[in-house]
Image (tube, grey):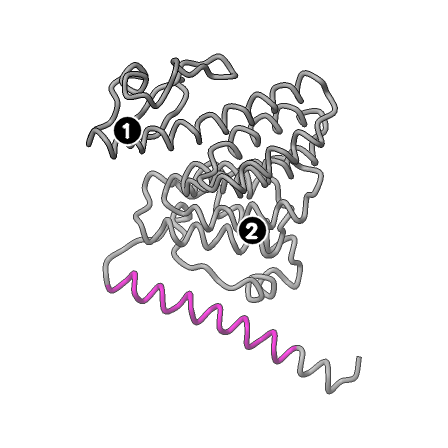
Amino acid sequence: MSENLKSRVMFVIAMLAALGLYLYGVSRQSWSASGYKPSLSQPEVVLPAPISIVLAGGDKHLAGNLLFFRVLVASLQQLDEGMQQNLANLQQQVSVLLPAHEDNYYVAAATLPWFGKVKEANLILHRAGEARPHDPYPFFFEGFNLQYFFGDYYHGAQMVERAALAAPQFKVALQVIAAKWYARTPTPGLSGQALDLLIAQAREPAFKQFLQKQKARHELLLSLNKKVAMFRMQMHRLPSSWQDMIEAGLLTEEPKDPLGAALMVDNQGNARPVK
């Protein structure tokens, strides 16, 4: 390396380090003015990843692990909304430096969504999944967050299918979950196509039979929902039982769930199995 280039590199490193120290100094002045005393359990300052690398002597693994140490010592119960966002930002920085960091994505999955930071958690999980293609958990946790917090069963099921591919030992169990989520997708065409694809790919006879019953349930519920809507239009109320719909001429007998559960109409007028 020429002396000129070496000087430029050292100048850039010095400037980045100075910026990091400046940000920390500004924060210290703000804390002093407000009488606030910072501690390691509260991540007040989140430096950009490049600055963290510089401050760690150019070692991104060390920088990522130092950032994650700050995550571990943070006490979430004591953090206000602003500090919770800082913690989410801190974990995202770790995922930029070390996307495959197992503990980081575990902690993110277990904490951030429950503090309203679902998108931040899923970004960390998505990076972990891309860096750990044979680990089913980042895909599963991301899928769970999609269906649980956003009601996005279709894309949640897709992530669970990716988890199944990453874990052959859990493949059938995960595909069962994916099939159930596909069946709850609001768009009938998408859910039906997804179930057909799962059925076509199934190799175990018992699992294929389960999927076929799941598809039959899905089609039955779609048909019942249409008939409930017709009853509501005619009677200006929801049916109190299937007998109401039989008496109205919309059904000839009480519907039977292919998977053996009792069926009911909820307060929104949707037919569904009783858990």
Q: Identify the secondary structure beneath mark 2.
A: helix
Task: Decide which of 32, 107 is in the foreground and name it.
Answer: 107
Task: Classify residue 46 as left or right of residue 6.
Answer: left
Residue 170: image location, x then y, percent: 66, 25
Q: Is residue 8 visible?
A: yes
Q: Secondary structure at mark 1?
A: helix
- Alpha-carbon span between mark 2 and mark 1: 63 Å
- The quarter of the rendered structure image containing the C terminus is top left
Q: Position of residue 270 (x, y in %)?
A: 35, 30
Q: Which residue, given by chain and number where applicable, does mark 1 sit on?
A: 231
- Depicted 131 relative to depicted 209: above or below: below
Secondary structure predominantly adopted by residues drawn in magenta: helix
The amino acid type found where label 2 is placed reads Leu
Residue 63 quadrant = bottom right
- Highlighted magenta segment, given as a residue range: 10-33
Q: Residue furthest right?
A: 1
Q: Amino acid at mark 1?
A: Phe
Q: Residue placed at 59% from the left, 53% from the top?
A: 64
The quadrant of the picture occupied by the N terminus is bottom right
User: Circle 2 is placed at which residue position?
Assistant: 66
